[in-house]
Image: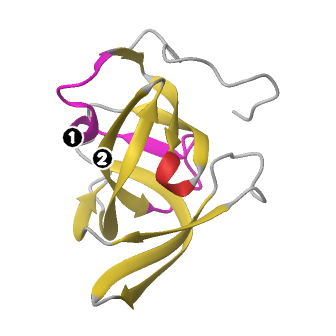
Amino acid sequence: MILGWREWVGLPDFGVSRIKAKLDTGARTSSLHVSSVETFKRDGGEWVRFAVVPQIKHKDAMVRAESPVLDERIIRDSGGHEELRVTIATTLEVAHWRWTVDVTLAARGAMKFRMLLGRQALGGRVLIDPHRSYLAGRRKSGADQ
């Protein structure tokens, strides 16, 4: 599958039909902008509760979600700063394709993209055309950027 450097993707496990993602082969892991992160125990396992804000211009359209904790990982950003992040596994939907990806939960509020898809999520499935965008389809009219 050939995709552009940015695409609209879905996170069906959380009821998020569309969120703008940057496809970044320079990043190993994927990350999702969330707020109100809270870990808790359920059935003897570690879980996390959080809020996804899929649209920059509509901060009130938040989606509350829960997921089992897959791991906690130290993530180094492009500036070399390290941060311990909760990692979950979730279903990623691009056009009519679906697969499971590991995603770290992060505060990406200052970033233009609410989601970053790294090479672990894309490898073996996707070729990226860095000169193109939204090859999997554009957001419907009136949509948030």
* Image height of 65 relative to 39, above or below: above
Q: Earlier in the sequence, mark 2 or mark 1?
A: 2
Tell me, for residue 120, which label it has, or none: 1
Identified by mark 2, the residue type is Val
Q: Quadrant of the C terminus?
A: top right
From the viewer's perspective, tell me whether residue 48 is left or right of residue 145. left
Residue placed under numbered mark 2 in the picture: 101
Question: Would you place residue 86 above or below residue 7 in this image?
Answer: below
Q: Nearer the viewer, mark 2 or mark 1?
A: 2
Residue 108 can be seen in this image: no
Q: Residue 35 appears at what percent x and percent y?
A: 57, 68
SS category of the residue bearing label 1: helix
Write the residue at 50% across / 62% down: 107
Question: Percent position (x, y) of residue 139?
Answer: 67, 25
Label 1: how many residues lie within 10 Å, few (<14), some (14-19) or many (20+)?
Answer: some
Residue at point 40%, 17% (across, down): 3
Q: Position of residue 47 (x, y in %)?
A: 38, 79
Q: Where residue 89 sits: x, y (%)? A: 31, 57
Q: Amino acid at mark 1?
A: Gln
Colour scheme used in the picture? secondary structure
Residue drawn where x is 68% and y is 45% of the image = 55
What segment carries the magenta color? 106-128
Judged from the image, the secondary structure of the residue bearing numbered disc 2 is: strand
Name which residue lies at 26% across and 68% down. Answer: 70
